[in-house]
Image (spheres, helix red, strand yellow):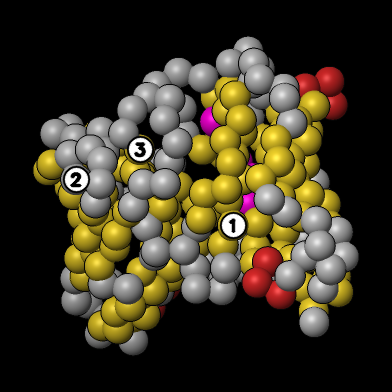
């Protein structure tokens, strides 16, 4: 299967700081990338969908000014959590697919802890 | 509306037992895609299988097999001769037809295989 990487795998930051998470498709061009959030023992919650070169589409209830998503190239998307607070602590997972009906592949996730 | 139901929250078996994970889905789309992903304790979602709605053939891959039944809207997953390494959370997911469809996840089934 295709490979998606995420960096960093784990980050601890102070409240009020911003954190950037990178998601890369390593061996395919990702026309669409997705960002999910997962709380302990729960399923994945879709935050936003981004197509290369266009603005991300956010799910209802997700603050676009807090979770900035950039999909600047066919292999890279970034999620920036701005002014992070302890309630933003979670497991963030990105996903990518190469075409409209193709399979989505997931990155290894980033554990964010905001103190 | 689209929905995926994984009624089994947790399953515990002893090594070498067979185990079936249930997945029932709802969709009004005539074309759709079904997936199973494995999430081990490390957190990364591993793609296992994708099935298109127009292909009801069951599939076997080693110790894994999948039973797709459109008549009952089910896509069940069986692990034969389970092993400790099979311990993980397993997610069933549905995606409607069309290039903009997003994955709809079930709540997951946590499988514990004890030696």
CA gap, disc 1 and disc 2: 24 Å
Residue appearing at x 39%, y 64% in the figure: A108
What is the number of the mark on residue A92? none
In the rendered image, residue B48, in percent from the top left (x then y), is placed at 57, 48
CA gap, disc 3 and disc 1: 18 Å
Magenta part of the chain: B91-95
Instruction: Label 3, secondary structure: give it.
Output: strand
Instruction: Label 2, secondary structure: give it.
Output: loop
Residue appearing at x 77%, y 55% in the figure: B79
- Residue A43 visible? The answer is no
In the rendered image, residue B112, in percent from the top left (x then y), is placed at 75, 72
Residue appearing at x 73%, y 70% in the figure: B83
Residue nearest the observer in this picture, A1 or B31? A1
Q: Is residue A45 left or right of residue B27?
A: left
Q: What residue would you read off at disc 2?
A: A75
Q: Is residue B79 above or below residue B32?
A: below
Where is the C terminus of chain A found, in terms of image quarters? Answer: bottom left
Q: Is residue B28 left or right of residue A48?
A: right
Tell me which secondary structure the magenta stretch mostly adopts: strand
Instruction: Label 1, secondary structure: give it.
Output: strand
Residues packed near mark 3 inside 10 Å, few (<14), some (14 to 19) or many (20 plus): many
Image quadrant of residue A73? Answer: top left
In the rendered image, residue B115, in percent from the top left (x then y), is placed at 80, 82
Q: What residue would you read off at disc 1?
A: B38
Q: What residue would you read off at disc 3?
A: A97
Residue nearest the observer in this picture, A60 or A20? A20
């Amino acid at each position: 299967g295709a490979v998606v990487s995420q960096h960093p795998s784990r980050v601890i930051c102070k409240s009020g700081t911003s954190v950037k998470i990178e998601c890369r498709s390593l061996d395919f061009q990702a026309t669409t990338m997705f960002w999910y959030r997962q709380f302990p023992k729960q399923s994945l919650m879709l935050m936003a969908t981004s197509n290369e070169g266009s603005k991300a589409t956010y799910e209802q209830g997700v603050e676009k000014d807090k979770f900035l998503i950039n999909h600047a190239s066919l292999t890279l998307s970034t999620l920036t959590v701005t002014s992070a607070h302890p309630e933003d602590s979670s497991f963030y997972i990105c996903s990518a697919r190469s075409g409209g009906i193709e399979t989505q592949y997931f990155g290894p996730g980033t554990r964010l802890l905001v103190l | 509306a689209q929905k995926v139901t994984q009624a089994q929250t947790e399953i515990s078996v002893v090594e070498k037992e067979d185990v079936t994970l249930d997945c029932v889905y709802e969709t009004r789309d005539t074309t759709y895609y079904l997936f199973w992903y494995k999430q081990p304790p490390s957190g990364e979602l591993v793609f296992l299988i994708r099935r298109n709605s127009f292909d009801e053939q069951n599939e076997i891959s080693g110790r894994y097999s999948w039973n797709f039944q459109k008549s009952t809207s089910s896509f069940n997953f069986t692990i034969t001769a389970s092993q400790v390494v099979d311990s993980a959370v397993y997610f069933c997911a549905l995606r409607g037809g069309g290039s903009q469809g997003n994955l709809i996840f079930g709540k997951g089934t946590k499988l514990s295989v004890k030696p």
